[in-house]
Amino acid sequence: MRSDTDIQQDGKVLSDRVLEKTGVAVARCYQCGKCSAGCPLASEMDFPPSQIMHLLQLGDFPEMAEKALRSHTIWLCLTCEICYARCPMEIDIPKVMDALRHESLAQKKVNPKARGILAFHRAFLDSVRYTGRLFEMGQVIDYKLRSGHFLQDLLQAPWMFFVGKLHLLPERIRDRRLLGRIFARIAKTRENRP
Amino acid sequence: MARIGVFVCHCGENISATVDVKKVAEAASRIPGVAHSVEYKYMCSDPGQQMIRNAIREKNLTGVVVAACSPRMHEPTFRRACAEAGLNPFLCEMANIREHCSWVHEKSEATTHKAFDIVRTLVAKVKRNKALLPIKVPVTKTALVLGGGIAGIQASLDIANSGHKVILVEKEPSIGGHMSQLSETFPTLDCSQCILTPRMVEVAQHPNITLHSYSELESMDGFIGNFKVRIRKKARSLDEKLCTGCGLCVQKCPSKKISSEFDAGLGLRPAIYVPFPQAVPNKPVIDREHCTYYRTGKCRLCEKICPTQAIRFDQEDEIIEADIGAVVVATGFDIKHGDFFPEYGYGKYKDVIDGLQFERLASASGPTLGEIRRPSDGQVPQTVVFVACAGSRDPAKGIEYCSKICCMYTAKHAMLYKHKVHHGKPFVFYMDIRAGGKMYEEFVRRAMEEDGVQYIRSRVSRIYERGGKLVVKGADTLLGSRPLEIEADLVVLATAGVAQAGAEQLAQRLHVSFDAHKFYAEAHPKLRPVETNTAGIFLAGACQAPKDIPESVAQASGAAAKVAILFSQSELVREPLIAVVDRQAPPLYSSCVGCFLCQPSCPYQAIEKEEIRDRDGQLIKTIAKVNPGLCQGCGTCVALCRTKSIDIQGFSHEQVYAEVLALLNRGEDNV
Amino acid sequence: MKTGFYPGCSMKGSAREYSESLLAVARELGRELPEVPDWNCCGATAAHNIDTDLALALPARILAAAEKDGMNEVLVPCAACYSRLSVTRHELLDDEALRNKISGLVEADYQGTAKVVNIIEWLASIPDLEAWVKKPFAHRVACYYGCLLVRPPGVVKFDRPEEPQSMDLLLKKMGAEPIDWAFKTECCGAGFSVSRTDLVAKLSGLILEDAVSRGAEAVIVACPMCHLNLDMRRPQIEKQVGKKINIPVIYITQALGLAMGIPARKLGLQRHKVAVKLSPRTAES
Amino acid sequence: MSDFNPKIVAFVCNWCTYAGADLTGTSRMKYSPQVSIIRFPCTGRIDFMLLLKAFASGADGIIVSGCHPNDCHYSSGNFHARRRWIVFRSLLDFLGIDVRRVRFSWVSAAEGAKWAQLVNETAEQIRLLGPFKRYHQLRGLGVE
Ligand SMILES: Cc1cc2nc3c(=O)[nH]c(=O)nc-3n(C[C@H](O)[C@H](O)[C@H](O)COP(=O)(O)OP(=O)(O)OC[C@H]3O[C@@H](n4cnc5c(N)ncnc54)[C@H](O)[C@@H]3O)c2cc1C
Ligand SMILES: Cc1cc2nc3c(=O)[nH]c(=O)nc-3n(C[C@H](O)[C@H](O)[C@H](O)COP(=O)(O)OP(=O)(O)OC[C@H]3O[C@@H](n4cnc5c(N)ncnc54)[C@H](O)[C@@H]3O)c2cc1C
Ligand code: SF4
Ligand code: SF4
Ligand code: SF4
Ligand code: SF4
Ligand code: SF4
Ligand code: SF4
Ligand code: SF4
Ligand code: SF4
């Protein structure tokens, strides 16, 4: 894992790296605000999407890029694609959000408020890794353990179980080994990144 | 055998300080074909010019090279001097040994050597120059003005007042264009009809103007000064000469529920109608698509009622032919309508309207007699949201450009609303305010400061209807981009200004070029903004790009002046430095193989097809032909032709190849 | 033409009734829907939140498996899975290098031959659907497309992203009366059902309120996530808006099944949190 | 190679680059005397066989320059030139002529300094490349 100083040393600002990874040029954003106006979660965000774009545009102020990486926004974004569908400049914001999340994770800058969301994603992927599918009961339990929010959802579980919606035992796919290999390969390339 | 005279100039010390002019003149005298070579202190002075004139006569010179300053400076001077001595001016060339040599290099052998290289190059060229005669074309002093909006009206009046004939063609039943639909106009808020109507009347009464309303250009041929046009006069279904415009027919027509184009769909009109009370000409037209008689064969009420028996149900379109010397295209623009904004419910909700509809609502002659009432239920809206840049500056919707007029008319609309509904709340959603113009910024400030229009900087994301209100979802980008919602009674979209629907077809008929958005292209974006690339065709008004009235009028007067300049001559004289296609004796006739690769490359559509026939009229071949009225002499076609069949006078293959060889000290011309 | 079926995880769990109703309808229509062999989870929101390669690899393995099995198209009824699968196909077809890389990761030679179709496309491709309707589903319905059925516009091209019409047309064919409403494509909170239930309650509340206020008798959905949020989160939603909301949320396949005369139980209607009480004509059979 | 004085031919358009080079002169900016200008109405007129002809006749380097895109006096001649230049580059490659011997540039009527810089840079480049020696071969190819 590289340090903050490395990041500045490689001479590329965050928006360049986003461009490289996603092909999305945030420089095109002209700050109209249409994305923020339509984003279902803008009011919950510390920086609504148009502001995230602007933080990235200020490439010569690394502390601004830092704010984007540490934002709650990137974890709140639901990938609902509303912003992208309406952006007059056709900027694929959800894709940028993905890239920012990945970078935020790699640099260990995840916003503390997003821990719950992240824990849920991790629990989800663990389930996929070991069973090939989402094992909802197991996932909910795992998430509760990771996030520390115990009650709210377990209350719902008995009913879901009762109407036959939750399985107690996970469904598994046959070629679980392959999935193991896929996850392992990806983990490896991630570590190998400069 | 060539007898070339070389005249080397010192330009005081400007040349002679770094170039050994004596040596240059002396070396030049040894170039084969040079019959005379001298140097002199100031070639452009009277004695200098006299020297040239004398030498031409005394030495029987067949060509002249003046080695001096840039041809951009004195070529006309020396060509005139040559002509005065009886030498065809196109047999004179300048060797630029000042700007391109003495001024840019230090005094040295090499500099003198270069000066001589330049002289030798031009000598090689001038030996191959041909005597050329200026091209003369006659000029028909009648102008065709297409489009009777404010731009076309202004251009017609200016041309007519300069004493020339004008044919004004308007496709609608009345002239007036969009300006006639406007209520009041920025930045002064004077009433549009009041300032426009007098001009419309002047057009109708001007002895030099022939107005063909409800007409369109059918076809056009020819070139500058000599166009031939065919105009289709669509059938009005009445005899204009008999009709007195009494309007009885309009009142009595039973088919009254037709959406009025003039009222932008907010009002109704009958099947026989005059678009608006001040129309010019003030004669009705029958809309055959909606007329009961044309649809069912029954009615003819108008015919019965007409006191002058003017109605002609069997009238047919008429074709009028005319000779024209110049064309002013003033066909205007339109605004974006329809379903292209589903997220704003445009075209779906009755109370989401466009700018022209708002103009009609605000107009004293409009469907609500100037009261702002919303279309759905006729209520006076208490909250109105104006959305700027609706569809403009929006690459996702295919329009990257700024429509230029909407910032201003949006401010105007918000103001007009506030003036009429004092307790009303106008909001404007905007991205930037573009108010560049005299008193424009002040106008927008007034809307904010005096009329309390609330400006919110954001693009609207969505508009939807909820309980009879329109929910407008925006954000305030100046306040952290938090989303905000306004419940409006009426929403006005300042939709993008776009080209007229038929703009492309008309451009093809006229052979003028247009940009990616079908707005007509000017010949040069800065220095020839009223000309097109086709000589003799000029542009005025919003057909070139969205424009407001002052700009349209200024450009129209500019175009009219261009026409007047053209018409001030009875013959056009043009430099003959144009392309020609090789012609030779039978059996070849021409080396042109008729591939027409050259044709699309010409920026001026100057390359035509010519059929070569033998005496019996049998077609031998079709070859290219350059229209000397249109060719501007760029030479693009010359470089493209594989068989070198098209060449350009003054920069011919022979000339430039000789220059290259001479410059590189190869070929027959070298010392 | 071989059409495969990718149920995705939720149709095996919380959205069992979606799968049950789809298969019941398919059986009645005489269409076979073999499952993609040994399919895995598409990775959903979690994968692309965490890693791009993973977000492509999981769907690629599914598509490669379908392709290997000779399927020309894969029906993906879950809108969220549909989005992941079609985005993956789009990106991998666009970029050969990426395709090779991901093929390597999943140990298959992915070509992109199998098309990804959603439930609307699939139903719309059935000729004379009207002819199957025995008991018109004569209700005022709010067709809820949600986020991912019509977006992103560059990838999904079967209907327009604003004011889509395709689901409304299908419901009309079933005899229903689709209402004109404002929240057709607004977001319900999607994958935050568990981690940010508060947000889901807020967003879903707005959607339901609009549907109710315009007189809809049912909300029709085509996505298990939408269903989860709008149906199972009803207690939280009601708490959020401070009133009771009774409108049922029905899968499009359930509505069709009812219209075709399939018994409600076979369509899994009893599994809903919000009881499906429609006028007796259709709901009881 | 210090005494090598390259011969460079500049093909320029009348409206922009020729005028720009005039401005270099009126501003008395100095540049390398190895370049001589041949005037054309427009870069669109420049037939690239002429460039080969120049090489075959002993030029060591060539400059082609006209108005900036969109500023063409004839509106689109320079676009034709640019398109042709792209094709011509591959022809140069094919003939084994180093493409660095040809500079394609835009110099406007106001860019006197740019012209001087362009000439100096080209002269320097050609000096580094050395004399063009293969013109005899070109003649063999029938360029003449
Ligand atoms: C909502 C709105 C408000 C505005 N408010 C203001 C304002 O307050 N102040 C201001 O300065 N400007 C205003 N403008 C701008 C103003 O309308 C234009 O500047 C002006 O109309 C341009 O005039 P024009 O003659 O070039 O084009 P137009 O007005 O469009 O006239 C073109 C004419 O050509 C005719 N025509 C089209 N095609 C053909 C054809 N093929 N053959 C023959 N005839 C043809 C048309 O029928 C029309 O009569 C406003 C514009 C809008 C949309
Ligand atoms: C920094 C700057 C950058 C610009 N960039 C651009 C650009 O990129 N593109 C663009 O299109 N425009 C540009 N412009 C605008 C452009 O300069 C003007 O549009 C243009 O110069 C206006 O021309 P003019 O002839 O009206 O006025 P001027 O250029 O001001 O010419 C007026 C002339 O009248 C003379 N004069 C004044 N009073 C008298 C008198 N009493 N008697 C006799 N002569 C008199 C003056 O000496 C002067 O020569 C720019 C302007 C500025 C300031
Ligand atoms: S909608 Fe697009 S252009 Fe507008 S602020 Fe958002 S990202 Fe930028
Ligand atoms: S994709 Fe993310 S940023 Fe865009 S509108 Fe949806 S939640 Fe907001
Ligand atoms: S002809 Fe040109 S170079 Fe000679 S004196 Fe006149 S200005 Fe100077
Ligand atoms: S009634 Fe006759 S004269 Fe009067 S306006 Fe109509 S056509 Fe003209
Ligand atoms: S014939 Fe046509 S135009 Fe005349 S009155 Fe009847 S409907 Fe009206
Ligand atoms: S003039 Fe104003 S409202 Fe119109 S497109 Fe330009 S910036 Fe937008
Ligand atoms: S002049 Fe040349 S390019 Fe044009 S048609 Fe003739 S052969 Fe072809
Ligand atoms: S010289 Fe230019 S303008 Fe003349 S015919 Fe050739 S391409 Fe057209």
Image (spheres, rainbow, N blue to C red):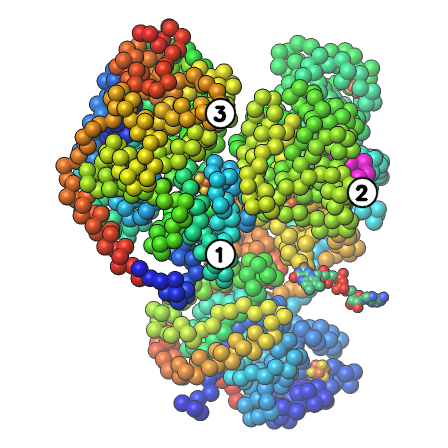
Kind of residue sitting beneath label 2: Thr
Residues marked 1 and 3 touching at CB (< 8 Å):
no
Q: Is residue B27 above or below residue B179?
A: below
Q: Residue furthest top?
A: C281
Which stretch is magenta?
Answer: B181-191
Image depth: mark 2 or mark 3 in front: 3
Q: Chain of mark 3?
A: C
Using the rendered image, report if marks 2 and 3 lie on a common chain.
Answer: no
Image location of residue B211, percent across then percent down? 77, 36
Judged left or right of residue B337, residue B586 is left
Between C22 and C4, the residue placed more toward the observer is C22
Query: Is residue A149 positioned above or below D5 on the image?
Result: above
Magenta segment: does it hold B184?
Answer: yes
Residue placed under numbered mark 2 in the picture? B188
- Give whichever of B460, A40 is nearer the camera: A40
Q: Secondary structure at mark 2?
A: loop
The amino acid pointed to by label 3 is Val
Q: Residues within 10 Å of mark 1 (few under 14, many from 20)?
A: some
Looking at the picture, how far across and down is residue B295, in whole percent?
62, 14
Give me the C-alpha separation between circle 1 and circle 3: 37 Å
Q: Residue at image x 25%, y 31%?
A: A137
User: Hey, which quadrant is residue B191 in on the image?
Assistant: top right
